[in-house]
Image (cartoon, rainbow, N blue to C red):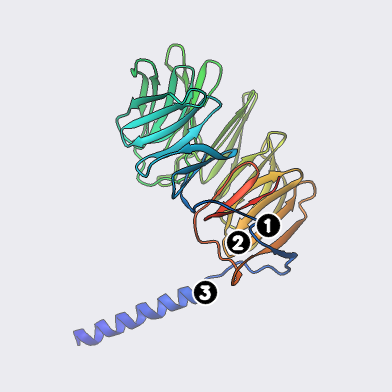
């Protein structure tokens, strides 16, 4: 009798499994506007990615402006770069700053794994895996400021980096906050709660332009315009501010949405069941790719769209490997589109 019950349970589990698999829906375009192939090839395939860069299997690094001169080893992680430095996590307890002009290197010790960082003058701002937000003096290696937030069990891989302003630094935390710290007296001056979800609630996007600031978690986008705060709730996959007047988001539901700075919807399209990745804007065109092998092109003026099938050697490519994008390019595995 026990054996029969087990057999029945197993049969029911398998039935539910196959029903679930068969009912899963995929993006199927009603119209294909043409075929397209990856026109460029990298020296090696992409191994790891974060918000600000990708590392190839051979150690070469792609930054926000394309392939860099930097090469790192397998034990290191690329974090970020600015006009003066490359920022590398050597392991879970050290950050390396590499001067772009002199190639000189500085090593800063940390208490846990660095996830995101930025440097200005002699101050290094770091977000650590235990949700600590630290400022280090790069000359003395002393900790000038530290504050530990609520530990996060699970986070989105798109971890935003701190942003330095004139006399402030804005930390994007792992628990859905923006912590603003004075870089002269090292006192917190503001704590902005974006969202309070328990899981995957880290800040995935942070940009500051003058008096305007845009930040997002996976559930909420916030804009602060001359001191006034605006919110937009969605299941957010990615965000891009185009440095003019619009913010663009990709959603879990297959939407591409154009918002103004106050987060009012201006335009949007919905591609049912689309699994979207990447936002690149060149001229008046926005480009994104869909996991099952499509390139989406959207005119940002009227939001008309075209869909191209991405062709490989044996038909349409399914894009199930590592992807990354910079200002002008979308990378997949060891190939890339250059839209400039």
Residue drawn at (34%, 42%) of the image = 75
Residue 69: % across, % down: 52, 36
Residue 97: % across, % down: 42, 27
Q: Is mark 2 on a helix, strand or loop?
A: loop
Question: Are the residues tagged 2 and 1 within 8 Å (C-beta)?
Answer: yes
Residue under numbered circle 3: 23
Q: What number of labels is visible?
A: 3
| Position above or below: 339 against 171 | below
Residue drawn at (47%, 74%) of the image = 21
Closer to us: mark 2 or mark 1?
1
Residue 243: % across, % down: 68, 34
Q: In what quadrant of the picture does the C terminus appear?
A: top right
Nearest to N terminus: mark 1 or mark 3: 3
The answer to whether residue 314 of the structure is visible from this angle is: yes
In-image side of 30 versus 190 (left or right)? right
Residue drawn at (54%, 28%) of the image = 82
Q: What element carries label 3?
A: helix
Separation of residues labelled 2 and 1 (CA atoms): 10 Å
Name the one closer to the observer, 234 or 109: 109
Alpha-carbon neighbours of circle 2 within 10 Å: few (<14), some, or many (≥20)?
Answer: many
């Amino acid at each position: 009798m026990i054996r029969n019950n087990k057999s029945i349970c197993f049969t029911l589990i398998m039935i539910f499994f196959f029903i679930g698999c068969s009912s899963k829906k995929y993006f199927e375009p009603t119209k294909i506007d043409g075929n397209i192939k990856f026109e460029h090839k990298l020296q090696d395939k992409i191994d790891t990615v974060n918000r600000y860069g990708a590392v190839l299997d051979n150690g070469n690094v792609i930054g926000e402006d394309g392939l860099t001169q930097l090469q790192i080893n397998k034990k290191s992680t690329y974090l970020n770069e600015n006009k003066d430095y490359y920022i590398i996590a050597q392991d879970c307890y050290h950050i390396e700053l590499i001067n772009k002009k002199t190639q000189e290197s500085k090593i800063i010790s940390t208490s846990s794994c660095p996830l995101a960082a930025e440097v200005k003058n002699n101050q290094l701002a770091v977000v650590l895996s235990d949700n600590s937000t630290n400022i280090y003096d790069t000359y003395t290696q002393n900790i000038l400021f530290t504050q530990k937030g609520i530990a996060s069990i699970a986070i989105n891989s798109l971890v935003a980096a701190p942003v330095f302003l004139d006399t402030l630094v804005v930390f994007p935390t792992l628990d859905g906050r923006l912590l603003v710290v004075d870089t002269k007296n090292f006192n917190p001056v503001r704590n902005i709660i974006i969202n309070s979800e328990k899981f995957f609630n880290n800040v995935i996007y942070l940009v500051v332009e003058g008096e305007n600031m845009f930040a997002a978690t996976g559930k909420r986008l916030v804009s602060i315009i001359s001191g006034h705060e605006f919110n937009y709730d969605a299941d957010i996959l990615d965000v891009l501010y185009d440095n003019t007047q619009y913010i663009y988001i990709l959603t879990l539901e297959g939407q591409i949405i154009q918002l103004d700075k106050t987060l009012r919807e201006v335009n949007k399209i919905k591609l049912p069941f689309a699994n979207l990745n990447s936002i690149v804007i060149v001229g008046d065109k926005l480009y994104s790719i869909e996991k099952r092998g499509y390139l989406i092109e959207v005119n940002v003026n009227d939001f008309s769209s075209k869909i191209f099938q991405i062709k490989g050697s044996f038909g349409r490519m399914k894009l199930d490997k590592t992807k990354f994008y910079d200002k002008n390019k979308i990378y997949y595995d060891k190939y890339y589109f250059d839209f400039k």
